[in-house]
Image: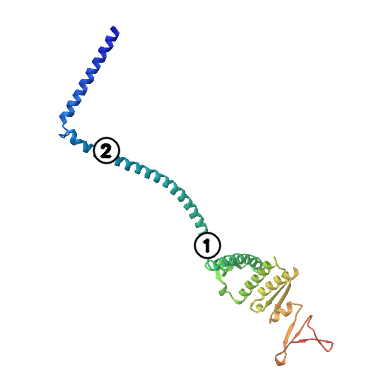
Amino acid sequence: MTAAAKDLDERQADLKIRQKDREKRLATEMASKITEKSLEELEPQFREQLEALKEQREIIAALKHKLSENTAAKERIKEKQAAIEAQKKECRRWENLHELIGSADGKKYRNFAQGLTFEMMIGHANGQLQKMTDRYLLIRDDAQPLELNVVDNYQAGEIRSTKNLSGGESFIVSLSLALGLSHMASKNVRVDSLFLDEGFGTLDEEALDTALETLAGLQQDGKLIGVISHVPALKERISTQIQVSPQTGGRSSILGPGCQMLEGGRILTPYIL
């Protein structure tokens, strides 16, 4: 009984303390006089505020949904941006390729392919040119990739256009290009013969010796070299000749090995064209 009475006393003391606190807070609220309206007057306002609160909660819910959708959209955009960047990188690669060799009519690609072949031919031509002279070196023109320039080592490496070469120089360069081209063709098709029409008359004695030595070297490799020329000095240097002599009536006669004409069962020489 004593313990129960003591517990009740403690509870009573606590309730009194709480009562005093509530009374104090009530007095404070009443003193503030938030409103002079009665409960009946405040009821409609309360319901309006509840409706407004409901609307605000719905708006908040809608905004949260939009935020969620926006977050998902950002992730999708990030993925698409990564795909776009990858595509841009691929496009840049194709643009660079187009810049090098691409055009609608295929001209740029043809120039590109021809440029590769031209570069190979120049390499072979330079190999032949070095056998004839150490003065010249053939290179491609920077502005016109399919045009040819000549490096003149005797003029401090000056780059000259082929249009400014003398007759003898042009012949040497042309001969080296022809030999280089025949060397390229021989990789797929056997080239056994080479005919040179004129050009020797523009060469000085040293250049003529060099050109003939080069052609003699090709002959030793098993190639047939034909020279068409009016230069008298060549008659002394070329043993096997076919001579063409003008005749009356606009005709010519040819005389040389293998030149024959049959008439009435007889072999006639020279052969009249």
Which residue: 52% across, 62% down? 98
Instruction: State the residue lying farthest toward the top.
Output: 2
Tell whether label 2 touches label 1 (CB within 8 Å): no
Q: CA distance from mark 1 to mark 2?
A: 69 Å
Q: Name the amino acid, label 1.
A: His
Residue hosting label 2: 50
Label 2 crowding class (10 Å Cα cut-off): few <14, some 14-19, many 20+?
A: few
Residue 34 appears left or right of 223: left
Residue 242, image quadrant:
bottom right
* Between discs 1 and 2, the one toward the N terminus: 2
Say if 41 sits above or below 3 in the image: below
Instruction: State the residue lying farthest toward the bottom.
Output: 249
The quarter of the rendered structure image containing the C terminus is bottom right
Residue 199, image quadrant:
bottom right
Say if 186 sits above or below 200 in the image: above
Q: Position of residue 104 (x, y in %)?
A: 53, 67
Which residue: 63% across, 75% down? 171
Mark 1: secondary structure: helix
Q: Position of residue 268 (x, y in %)?
A: 81, 87
Say if 246 sits above or below 13 in the image: below
Q: Name the amino acid, label 2.
A: Leu
The quarter of the rendered structure image containing the N terminus is top left
Judging depth in this view, the residue of 29 and 116 nearest the camera is 29
Which residue: 48% across, 51% down? 83
Judging depth in this view, the residue of 43 and 142 nearest the camera is 43
Mark 2: secondary structure: helix
Q: Position of residue 125 (x, y in %)?
A: 64, 67
Label 1 crowding class (10 Å Cα cut-off): few <14, some 14-19, many 20+?
A: some
Q: Position of residue 190 (x, y in %)?
A: 72, 68
Residue 203, image quadrant:
bottom right
Which residue: 19% across, 26% down? 26
Residue hosting label 1: 98
